[in-house]
Image (spheres, coloured by chain):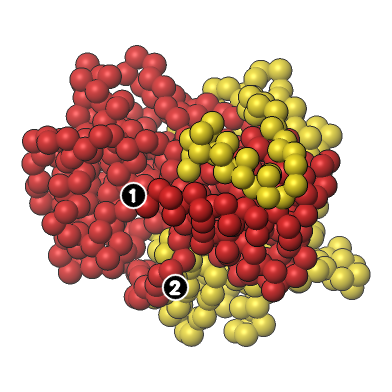
Chain colours: A red, B yellow
């Protein structure tokens, strides 16, 4: 029995975004086990590389919706495009990356197609020709598995969890399709953040600071280590609420959920609300002066010590390490 | 301006959770229930809109008896009225079912200019009920707002996305979801708490809303739930800071292979 998985390909400024390449990669792995096919849906103005990249990572076909109605994102118009693609391909599953856009779009697609949606999935198993999804709930204190009762199984996929397939030459046809592009709410303008700052939700390495930093001006210790490691910067809720850094840095409940390869928590005690946002990181390092801090329960490596001594030493070591490798 | 705020009552994140005997859900007794933190931003924004534009703020919450305290809390913050939405047939709905019921409630209440929801209910963390609700009401959606300005029927909304901020134009009526950064929710003072006791609170059941049981049949089903496997015990690195730093970098490179 052949399976078809549809994936949504998100672009920004015409460029394909990595979480969408992860989604197409996971779709390819599952389809390969079911002699299936993968169809990616590209909505809006994408550059020439986007369809090629989707093909190289696993798409057999790309359906493209473009034109004036699709110049700026809206869940209404994008949702109709996705629903149209579902009608064209009658897929078994639809994968959408759990990004800001994906969170906004997926429910609309679920509604328009009358399908079930499982959010923030971090793994899939197959059961015959059906999927079983795995995801964290309750601040990571529970891991749940879900199945769907609807024919089309829609899932959003947590970024940074699914590995990319090795790019390969693959026949990938690109077809254009049309949908109603009208919308009553849409993006007017995108204000890019300081380009020197790495995006938290998609970073491989994150260095994060908490109350142990003691004062706003000492957050530079976190920045220096982050710079040395090419990391994105994070923060606990406590120092965001104190106004030391902006809310866009906050990791955890009411902030961001991250799954980097390496998470370095500096002076963060590890309240459950913080763990909720980072406990699925692959390797966790905790640096804290309190040996009883709960962060050590989730950490792989720990240093009990004074941040003001450990961080400068670590920054120097990290610089030496990364310089020797370039 | 008529504003409906949909709120959810959830277990306090700090609660100790136990898996029920069926292995598919948490034990719901002996928990402290709170308003989902994202919903406090929604209530606050509703109150700010009312202060600026006049009008009314109506709270709705789907759930059993425990949601009443959450609604009273919202009334104490300053909302005008509240409706508990409950019926035995609403037990254990998935997000699609919840959205169907909420859409019926919004219609029953005659619709609104702005429907505010926290962008996700803490705990289940589905982050989809508001989007499904917008679909069911055939309304536009702007999610995860950190800034909201309304003039007439035009809303300008900012939301944070990866790499920057999007500025949206939306036409009301619309569903707008809220997150931290939008505002600072007020505390309910003693006066507010006293006033809340006299504010109207009704119950909307399935018959009133005209929601048949098959309209809320599950589209997704949780099969299992269990605490995650324990992470391996921490390797503590001893020595003076310079030694600790050197050893940590070595372990990350040679053992964990992450740098």
Q: Is residue A267 visible?
A: yes
In this picture, is B105 found above or below B64? below
Q: Indicate the position of residue A195 as horizontal and vertical percent values.
A: 40, 70
Instruction: Identify which residue, B195 or B125, lies in the foreground.
Output: B125
Task: Give the residue at mark 2.
Answer: A194
Q: Is A309 situated left or right of A89 in this image?
A: right
Image quadrant occupied by the N terminus of chain A: top left
In this picture, is B152 found above or below B148? below
Q: Residues within 10 Å of mark 2 (few under 14, many from 20)?
A: few
In this picture, is B5 found above or below B48? above
Q: Chain of mark 1?
A: A
**Residue at 27% across, 19% down:** A33
Q: Is A313 situated left or right of A193 in this image?
A: right
**How far apart are the two marked residues, 1 and 2, measured between alpha carbons?**
19 Å
Task: Give the residue at mark 1.
Answer: A18
* Secondary element type, mark 1: helix
Q: Indicate the position of residue B183 as horizontal and vertical percent values.
A: 65, 72
Q: Chain of mark 2?
A: A
* Secondary element type, mark 2: loop
> Does the CB distance between marks 1 and 2 fall below 8 Å?
no
Label 1 and label 2 in one chain: yes
Q: Indicate the position of residue B176 as horizontal and vertical percent values.
A: 51, 65
Q: Residues within 10 Å of mark 1 (few under 14, many from 20)?
A: some
In this picture, is B6 found above or below A56? below
Q: Is residue B37 visible?
A: no
Instruction: Identify which residue, B153 or B109, lies in the foreground.
Output: B153
Instruction: Identify which residue, A124 or A265, lies in the foreground.
Output: A265
Q: Earlier in the sequence, mark 1 or mark 2?
A: 1
């Amino acid at each position: 029995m052949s399976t078809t998985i549809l994936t949504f390909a998100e672009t920004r400024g015409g460029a394909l975004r990595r979480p969408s390449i992860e989604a197409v990669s996971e779709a390819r792995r599952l389809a390969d086990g079911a002699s299936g096919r993968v169809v990616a849906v590209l909505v809006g103005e994408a550059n020439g590389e986007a369809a090629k990249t989707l093909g190289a990572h696993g798409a057999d076909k790309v359906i493209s919706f473009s034109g004036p109605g699709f110049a700026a994102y809206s869940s209404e118009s994008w949702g109709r495009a996705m629903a149209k693609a579902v009608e064209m391909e009658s897929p078994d599953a639809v994968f959408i990356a759990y990004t800001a856009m994906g969170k906004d779009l997926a429910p609309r697609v679920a509604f328009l197609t009358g399908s079930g949606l499982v959010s923030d999935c971090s793994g899939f198993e197959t059961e015959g020709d059906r999927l079983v999804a795995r995801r964290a709930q309750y601040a990571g204190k529970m891991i749940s598995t879900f199945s769907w009762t609807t024919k089309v199984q829609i899932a959003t996929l947590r970024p940074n969890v699914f590995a990319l397939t090795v790019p390969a030459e693959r026949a990938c046809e690109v077809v254009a399709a049309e949908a109603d592009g009208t919308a009553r709410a849409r993006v007017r303008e995108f204000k890019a953040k300081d380009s020197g700052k790495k995006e938290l939700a998609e970073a491989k390495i994150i260095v994060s600071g908490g109350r142990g930093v003691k004062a706003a001006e000492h957050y530079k210790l976190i920045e220096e280590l982050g710079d040395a490691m090419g990391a994105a910067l994070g923060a606990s809720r406590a120092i965001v609420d104190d106004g030391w850094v902006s809310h866009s840095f906050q990791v955890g409940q009411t902030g961001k959920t991250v799954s980097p390869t390496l998470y370095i928590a500096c002076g963060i005690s590890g309240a459950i609300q913080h763990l909720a946002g980072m406990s699925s990181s692959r390797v966790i390092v905790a640096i804290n002066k309190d040996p009883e801090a709960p962060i050590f329960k989730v950490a792989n490596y720990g240093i009990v010590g004074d941040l003001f001594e450990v961080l400068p030493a670590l920054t120097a070591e990290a610089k030496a390490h990364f310089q020797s490798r370039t | 301006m008529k504003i409906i705020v949909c709120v959810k009552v959830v277990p306090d994140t700090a609660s100790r959770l136990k898996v029920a005997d069926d292995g598919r859900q948490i034990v719901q007794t002996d928990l402290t229930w709170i308003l989902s933190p994202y919903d406090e931003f929604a209530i606050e924004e509703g109150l700010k809109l009312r202060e600026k534009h006049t009008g009314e703020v109506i709270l709705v919450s789907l759930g059993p008896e425990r949601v009443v305290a959450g609604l009273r809390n919202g009334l104490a913050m300053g909302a005008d009225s509240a409706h508990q939405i409950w019926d035995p047939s609403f037990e254990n709905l998935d997000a699609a079912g919840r959205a169907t019921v909420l859409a019926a409630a919004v219609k029953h209440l005659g619709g609104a200019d702005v429907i505010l929801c926290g962008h996700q209910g803490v705990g289940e963390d589905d982050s989809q009920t508001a989007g499904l609700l917008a679909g069911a009401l055939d309304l536009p959606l702007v999610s995860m707002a950190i800034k909201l300005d309304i003039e007439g029927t035009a809303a300008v909304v900012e939301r944070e996305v990866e790499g920057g901020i999007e500025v949206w134009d939306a036409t009301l009526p619309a569903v707008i979801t809220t997150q931290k950064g939008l505002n600072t929710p007020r505390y309910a003072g003693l006066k507010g708490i006293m006033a809340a006791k006299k504010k109207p609170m009704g119950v909307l059941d399935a018959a009133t809303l005209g929601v048949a049981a098959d309209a809320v049949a599950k589209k997704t089903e949780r099969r299992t739930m269990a605490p995650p496997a324990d992470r391996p015990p921490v390797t503590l690195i001893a020595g003076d800071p310079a030694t600790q730093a050197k050893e940590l970098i070595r372990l990350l490179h040679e053992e964990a292979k992450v740098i």
